[in-house]
Image (spheres, rainbow, N blue to C red):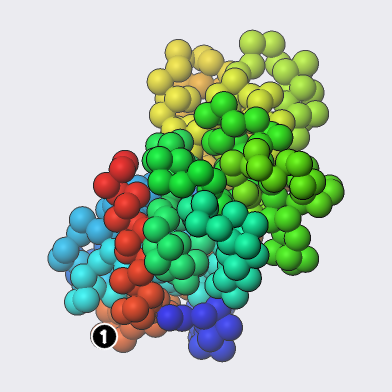
Amino acid sequence: MTSLLTAFENQTLPQSYLEADEQELCERIAHAKQALGTDLLMLAHHYQKDEVVAFADETGDSLQLAQIASKNKTAKYIVFCGVHFMAETADMLTEDHQQVLLPDLSAGCSMADMANQHQLTTAWTRLQQQWPEEIIPITYVNSSAAVKAFVGDHGGAIVTSGNADTILRWAFTQKKRVFFLPDQHLGRNTAYHMAISLDEMALWDPLTGQLLDNAGKEPLAADQAPATKVILWNGWCSVHQQFSVQQIDSLRHRIPDLKVIVHPEAPHEVVEAADEYGSTNKILQVVKASPAGTKWAVGTDHNLVGRMAKQLCPDHEIHFINPIACACLTMNRIKLPHLAWCLEELAAGRSVNRITVDEATTASALKALERMLALS
Ligand code: SF4
């Protein structure tokens, strides 16, 4: 498996690509794409920069892109303009003769990096002491292949932001309690909308190895433990955690008849203050399906919200919930120089920045992925 440490060591983008101007890079990318023809499938996540999306064969959220990659049996090269865990998932779902490449190996995901296999093993051992044989692990697709493999080996499944509700309901048919990682907000928001109260949730802090109350302020009290149904991993998305109820209130005050839609990686109180919430794909669908002229404040990544305003939802008035929020830094690592380099090397018969997951990890992780796909 490619670790991010190895990735940084191997990263050798020639300086000439950084010195080329945008027009030249666009021409070279177009030329390399044409030379590669159907050997190439270029996928871009919705959060990618506009100039990268412009060259994509397909765009989508992480689930859609994984499904597209798994259905394509012919492309020799899948260039994944997204982040590391997405390329890992694509490698696990594609055939042996297909290569998955990530144009910039430093495009990781800060949330996925908040849970590693060692921390998970430690947590699992501790939680088994507390609730022997009563817990099923569930991981968000935004996690490493190693975490997915652990979950697969322990009877659990993967969720996406689009199917978390379905998978969580299934999980409770398997065990009394769910251990949800790495995004505490997706887990909390999903469980809450299944009528599980906040008092029935606890927070596992991987840094201190402590089991805390839902607010993460106090150790979980002994009398709360029997009622605990969901144990949330203390992880979060640096992009979606930037939204607040104050921002929503301020926008509603300034813009009459405003509707608000947010991603479920946003904090619980933000989701409750919104009119709607859902995956990236659902956000797009709901906004597009609303009557022309509807005013929307959208709580997700800047690149996508900007594209909704300019191009994808031209009949609607689109606002950022937080116009000064930082975009996803790691998604934005994929830029034209890296893309041109990756494609030109492929056209010359060389693979750079290939992402591979070893066979044993793939076999275990696929158990969790296949449980999800069977339930979705
Ligand atoms: S938006 Fe959040 S969850 Fe998605 S890649 Fe960036 S840090 Fe990770």
As helix, strand or loop, the secondary structure at mark 1 comes to loop
Question: Residue at point 50% right, 33% down?
Answer: 278
Where is 12 relative to 156, above or below? below
- Say if 15 sits above or below 251 in the image: below
Picture quadrant of residue 198: top right
- Residue 167, x across and y down, in percent: 41, 42
In which image quadrant can residue 42 be found? bottom left
Q: Is residue 289 above or below residue 345?
A: above
Can residue 17 be seen in this snapshot?
yes
Residue 266 lies, in percent from the top left, at: 64, 40
* Image point (56%, 52%), residue name: 179
Give the residue type that dot 1 points to: Gly
Q: Read off the residue under disc 1.
A: 349
Q: Residue 286: where, in percent of width, then height?
A: 45, 25
Mark 1 is surrounded, within 10 Å at the Cα level, by few (under 14), some (14 to 19) or many (20 or more) other residues, namely: few
Residue 57 visible within the image: no
The tally of labels here is 1
Residue under the image location 59 percent in, 20 percent down = 275
- The location of residue 308, given as percent across then percent down, is 50, 35
Give the position of the C terminus as an image quadrant.
top left
Q: Horizontally, is 229 left or right of 280 in the view?
A: right
Taking 284 as reference, is 76 above or below it?
below
